[in-house]
Amino acid sequence: MEKRWLAHYPPQIPHHIDYPPKILPDYLKETAAQFGQKEAIYFLGKRLTFQDIYEQSLKIANYLVELGLQKGDRVSIMLPNCPQAVISYYGVLMAGGIIVQTNPLYTERELEHQLNDSGATVIITLDMLYPKVVKVKATTSLKHIIVTSVQDYLPPIKKLLYPFVQKKQNQPLVHIEERDDQHLFKRIIASTKAEEIDIEIDPIEEVALLQYTGGTTGFPKAAMLTHRNLIANTLMCAHWMYRCQKGEEAILGVLPFFHVYGMTTIMNLSVMQAYKMILLPKFDVETVLKTIEKQKPTLFPGAPTMYIALLNHPNLSKYDLSSIKVCISGSAPLPVEVQEKFEKITGGKLIEGYGLTEASPVTHSNFLWDGERIKGSIGVPWPDTDAKIISLETGQEANVNEIGELVVRGPQVMKGYWNQPFETDSVLRDDWLYTGDMGYMDEKGYFFIVDRKKDMIIASGYNIYPREVEEVLYEHPKVQEAVVVGVPHEYRGETVKAFIVLKEGEQCTEEELDQFMRNRLAAYKVPRIYEFRKELPKTAVGKILRRVLIEEENKKG
């Protein structure tokens, strides 16, 4: 089918973008030249300019080269959102290295697997994570550990108080001695020259990043994302947000940079557009509310669970959130009720987008301003992005409003999976990326996701999509979070089970929920089992780990 969605593009969004033959560090260099003294990062009271970030990135790059890093060598970055995460990211790329983004919450087993799979020879990490790294070093290809501390980038008073805070929070006070294989980040910054490095890098062919998929469906695989992939998706994002002025916006950076969504929509976008990044190392509701009121970010990319947590905070009304004008929600479906309530409180726009690690990550979103926005839809494909629905029965393109698998293609789609040709061939076919998500396209070219292909529940021969059931559960005034899974059933094959987190102070019975659902859904879709929980298992970006709940159910036999 033709790209019918293009007819709905407002005139400010181009159908096609020219992608210059650049690598990611070129944008940091340009921004530092044009906006050198502009504040680039605010971190717990510490402020850095774009010139600071550029020079310190060069220092890290030069030091890595001194250590013997060759073009194409992998460097693991195991850091929360902090200035060092940005500096390390651009420093590794300036040195010609490939970044391996590593979740600081990884267990030793997960860390060991990722380091061995990627072949990383250097890791940049926090002092409090150092013991974990040391334990796995001997069984990996690591040659060097570069260690930093949150304290390194705090303002003077907080720097003095930091050891007391660490002690109070029972965090280990780790002393690291410098030696041939161990290096201190702060000393590198203090003593290394900020010299330009001349390395030939092909932005289209050469990999910039190994981004491991979230692991929600099993052992993570590494998507190979090139400079072109990441630049294309960041430029698409900038064009989509056409009312945001270069050098004028402030963006709340609470989505982790070790996840591709935060990396593209916060870090790379801010560097490209000279936006100020207000960084928070972790999501804490009270801290986020205070930060929004005091620092007044205009942009707040997030995940549905973040917006839900803010909306359900008992002191929400005490905070002024009116600075926020744009929020793009990703990583999980956005309930309509959450969208409407958040927009009412902030006065800004909260839209749902869609993407996946293998696409750098964004492929679709709703229009922010001038185009039509359809509730429950992930919107339309971004510039230069093609999409279609493939029928599971015929393997051909599905008809309008017919459910099938969403496939996408565009300059943001990965090169393939690292060292996994079979897995690559299973999802990349004729330049099309098979997403594993079930959905449909309407007459206007707007796309809707009904669920993951593997999450679809088949009960008594009926196809049931958990997202549809979850949307109705979120309409219940007492429900804060909900997730639906299929569990084995002797007669139906599978049946529907709902895990529920109630709003604080609320009480609810299975019978009450059952009656509510039966008034709104066909009988075969209504959950047969309800389980109330205080919290649900989630990834670092707030995506509910459905797989963990399914595994728990399977263990019950």
Image: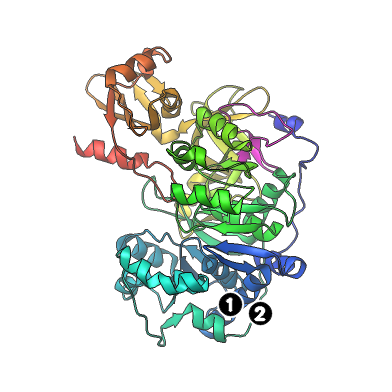
Q: Which residues are magenta?
A: 364-386
Question: Where residue 155 sits: x, y (%)?
Answer: 52, 71
Q: Earlier in the sequence, mark 2 or mark 1?
A: 1
Q: Is residue 504 above or below residue 293?
A: above
Q: Which circle marks residue 23 in the picture?
A: none
User: Label 2 to label 1, Cα distance in Å?
Assistant: 8 Å
Are discs 2 and 1 less than 8 Å apart at CB? yes
Q: Which circle marks residue 61 in the picture?
A: 1
Q: Residue furthest right?
A: 11
Per the image, is 149 magenta? no
Give the residue displayed 39% in from the left and 62% down from the top.
Answer: 114
Q: Is residue 20 left or right of residue 434?
A: right
Question: Where residue 456 sits: x, y (%)?
Answer: 40, 29
Front one among 532 and 442:
532
Amino acid type shown at disc 1: Ala
Residue carrying label 2: 197
Question: Where residue 37 sits: x, y (%)?
Answer: 71, 69
Per the image, is 366 magenta? yes
